[in-house]
């Protein structure tokens, strides 16, 4: 142990001797981060002593004033003491604020040059007594002055030694004062002694400062080595790649020899370069690679990260980058320290965590991360050599049916077989990956002629439509494919992903089993949909949404028996937007429950002020029927408005029965138990079944306007359908309403056929609540 300690001390002495005088005495800020940290440690050590040293300085100055008051002009003494007191006081206050007020320290940082100026001013004040008052002083006062000057020069060499620039200036100034005293005393021997004493102090200051700097550097470097070890442990990077370091301005200041060797670069080609200029000199990789952009964002914002995969500037390698920010004592970002590993081969063919992170564990295909990286490579190659580059998104048809009927275990085995068949279909022209669920991706790097890509998509769809044998089960699925081509459908990875996804969505709409190429209008339509969704959310929080009410007429008497509440949206820029355009957006955005509940409450509140037994009809969607939430909303609305339950009609379409019949019927039964009337809307237009008419206990059936219009025009099939519906309604004892009546001819035909109620533009268009005519109760309140 003793030998180890001696070795450390010897290394420290060697390092301190190797410190150049320029570095030791420079007033400028060191260029390297370690040097700046050492300089800050010097300044901090000096600042810690300032309160004590200024107190001694003030006390010594007061003693000097008291000792010279009998022989020196008191005004001069007062002026001198006031200057010394002001300088010491401001210096002491600043030192305290620097230590206790971080905001002040950040706004007004201390510097070597600033400290040296303050020391020069203080030392200059101590030259006044020996230069101007010594001759008039009494012998005992002269001796006292010599002792004080000697003590001050000695104390300064000790208290200021952490910053040798300041210490030497202070010793030098006071040594001049001491020399002047010896000259005035006409004592050559004392002059020689003063010069020797000053030389010894200067040598001691330099030696002690060297040791202080060396010790501070060792302490900082030892701390950083501990941080590096901790970093390697945290990033699990003990054996691969190498270390790198950035300064506060994000320039490369250190890079390990191992990393330089892997990059085949020399140190002078790297050190001093800004990280962006080094990683992406032309800015092309960041434009394509989301990984590179994420890395830049993290480095600029000071966010730690790990395992960021980026492509090298020469586009031949892939690197995994991990790093943590370095903060100074004030918590400010002082740089970065991290590790980098070459993962070019490991991510495709290795057996370690790098490849595992890029492989789908079920199918052993590329996962979403690797698909993104492969697509980035293909895009960059297309930029460099005009090679083909396209993305095909493959979505399986009827796969959910396999999972639901045979279980997830069979479904997983089917996905494995689909992956194998996809690779056979694609061949060497592309790379296959699974990006989640039953969705696969093909990064195509062959010919990107539309006919060729269409043929590839057709081959994939044909191969996947063939039967699969999984265990004892023979399974059939299909595939729908969306295609995006670089660069016309997107020059970057994210754009191609988005374009292929939009094309896939369009292919599904057109009919499963086919494929679709991305077209610009698909993006425009999707963007318009997104903006409308954003606007409808804002409208929900403001007054953009409103209800309009359309009258429902008794067919025999012509009196109004109710009104249907219809949701309307007046866009601030687009004007009135049709319900068939914004209702699907509301459903897709998951706002149907929130908006539907608002419609029920608003309609009940309005209907509570209508005359007599007039009813209000509200449309509800299949999504609202899930759970007991709708029944609670209806009960709350009826209770708060005191509307009779029989005056509220809830209209549902036949589509609500396409899902879980039992759950739908249970929801409808909960509503009927509240006393509200259930109405079947658009009957005959879609999935018609007589069974659910009796089970759901509807109070009214609304005949779709297409049959009303056809029957009025004499179409025999429409007349037959309307007669059948009316006969069914009479047998069940329920009312009927003919929708979409726009002419007197249509109204008369429906009356003759036996409809009990009529609704349509012929009797009135939907109007806002404030435009409704005042009822009897309202007129009485107004009067």
Image: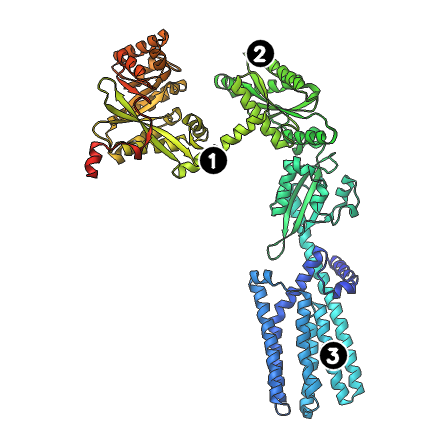
Contact, mark 3 vs mark 1 (Cβ under 8 Å)? no
Element on which disc 2 rests:
loop
Which of the pair 573/62 is nearer the observer? 573
The crowd level at tag 2 (other Cα within 10 Å; few <14, some 14-19, many 20+) is few
Q: Quadrant of residue 24?
A: bottom right
Q: Nearer the viewer, mark 3 or mark 1?
A: 1
Taking the image as shown, residue 686 lies to the left or right of residue 192, namely left
Element on which disc 3 rests:
helix
Residue under label 1: 534
Residue under label 2: 467
Residue at the image position 34 percent from the left and 9 percent from the top: 714
Residue at the image position 62 percent from the left and 92 percent from the top: 70
Q: Which mark is residue 664?
A: none
Q: Nearer the viewer, mark 1 or mark 2?
A: 1
Residue 233's place in the image compared with 428, above or below, is below
Q: Between disc 2 and disc 3, whose residue precedes?
A: 3
């Amino acid at each position: 142990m003793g030998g180890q300690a001696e070795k450390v001390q010897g290394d420290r002495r060697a390092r301190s001797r190797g410190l150049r005088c320029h570095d030791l005495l420079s007033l400028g800020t060191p260029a390297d981060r370690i040097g700046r940290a050492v300089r800050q440690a010097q300044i901090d050590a000096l600042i810690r002593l300032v309160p004590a040293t200024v107190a001694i300085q003030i006390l010594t100055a007061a003693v000097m004033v008291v000792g010279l008051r009998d022989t020196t002009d008191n005004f001069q003494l007062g002026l001198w003491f006031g200057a010394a007191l002001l300088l010491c006081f401001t210096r002491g206050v600043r030192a305290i604020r620097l230590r206790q007020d971080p905001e002040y320290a950040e706004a007004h940082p201390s510097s070597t040059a600033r400290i040296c100026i303050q020391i020069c001013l203080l030392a200059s004040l101590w030259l006044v007594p020996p230069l101007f008052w010594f001759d008039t002083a009494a012998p005992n006062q002269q001796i006292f002055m010599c002792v004080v000057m000697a003590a001050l020069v000695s104390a300064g060499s000790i208290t200021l030694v952490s910053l040798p620039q300041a210490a030497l200036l202070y010793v030098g100034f006071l040594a001049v004062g001491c020399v002047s005293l010896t000259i005035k005393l006409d004592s050559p021997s004392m002059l020689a002694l003063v010069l020797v004493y000053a030389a010894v102090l200067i040598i001691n200051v330099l030696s002690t400062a060297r040791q202080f700097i060396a010790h501070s550097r060792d302490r900082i470097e030892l701390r950083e080595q501990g941080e590096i070890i901790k970093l390697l442990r945290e990033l699990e990077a003990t054996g691969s790649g190498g270390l790198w370091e950035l300064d506060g301005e994000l320039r490369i200041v250190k890079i390990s020899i191992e990393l330089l060797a892997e990059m085949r670069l020399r140190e002078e080609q790297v050190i001093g370069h800004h990280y962006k200029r080094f990683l992406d000199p032309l800015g092309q990789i960041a434009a394509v690679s989301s990984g590179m952009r994420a890395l830049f964002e993290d480095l600029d914002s000071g966010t730690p990260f790990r395992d960021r995969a980026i492509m090298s500037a020469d586009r031949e390698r892939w690197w995994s980058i991990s790093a943590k920010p370095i903060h100074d004592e004030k918590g400010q970002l002082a740089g970065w320290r991290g590790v980098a590993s070459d993962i070019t081969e490991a991510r495709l063919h290795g057996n370690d965590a790098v490849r595992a992170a890029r492989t789908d564990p079920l199918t052993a295909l590329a996962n979403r991360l690797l698909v993104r990286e492969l697509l980035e490579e293909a895009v960059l190659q297309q930029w460099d050599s005009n090679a083909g580059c396209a993305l095909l998104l493959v979505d399986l048809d009827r796969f959910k049916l396999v999972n639901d009927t045979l279980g997830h275990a069979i479904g997983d085995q089917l996905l494995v077989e689909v992956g194998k068949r996809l690779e056979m279909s694609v061949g060497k022209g592309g790379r296959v990956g699974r990006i989640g669920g039953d969705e696969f991706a093909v990064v195509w790097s062959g010919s990107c002629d539309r006919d060729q890509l269409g043929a590839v998509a057709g081959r994939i769809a044909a191969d996947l439509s063939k039967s699969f044998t999984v265990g004892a089960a023979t399974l059939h699925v299909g595939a729908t494919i969306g295609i995006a081509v670089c660069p016309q459908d997107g020059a970057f990875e994210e754009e191609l992903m988005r374009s292929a996804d939009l094309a896939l969505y369009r292919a599904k709409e057109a009919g499963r089993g086919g494929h679709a190429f991305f077209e610009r209008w698909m993006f425009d339509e999707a963007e318009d949909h997104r903006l409308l969704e954003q606007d409808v959310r804002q409208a929900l929080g403001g007054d953009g949404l409103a209800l309009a009410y359309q009258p429902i007429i008794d067919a025999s008497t012509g009196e109004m028996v109710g009104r249907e509440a219809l949701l309307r949206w007046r866009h601030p820029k687009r004007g009135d937007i049709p319900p068939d355009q914004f209702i699907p957006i509301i459903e897709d955005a998951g706002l149907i429950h929130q908006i539907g509940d608002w419609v029920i409450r608003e309609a009940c509140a309005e209907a509570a002020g209508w005359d007599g037994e007039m009813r209000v009809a509200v449309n509800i969607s299949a999504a609202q029927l899930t759970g007991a939430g709708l029944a609670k909303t209806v009960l709350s609305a009826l209770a708060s408005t005191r509307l009779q339950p029989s005056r509220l009609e809830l209209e549902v379409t036949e589509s609500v029965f396409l899902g879980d019949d039992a759950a739908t019927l249970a929801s409808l039964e909960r509503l009927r138990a509240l006393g509200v009337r259930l109405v079947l809307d658009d009957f005959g237009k879609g999935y018609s079944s007589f069974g659910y008419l009796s089970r759901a206990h509807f109070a009214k059936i609304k005949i779709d306007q297409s049959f009303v219009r056809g029957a009025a025009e004499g179409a025999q099939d429409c007349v037959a359908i309307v007669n059948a519906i009316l006969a069914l309604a009479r047998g069940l004892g329920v009312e009927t309403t003919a929708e979409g009546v726009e002419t007197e001819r249509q109204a008369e035909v429906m009356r003759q056929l036996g409809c009990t109620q009529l609704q349509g533009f012929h009797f009135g268009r939907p109007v806002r609540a404030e435009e409704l005519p005042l009822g009897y109760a309202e007129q009485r309140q107004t009067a």
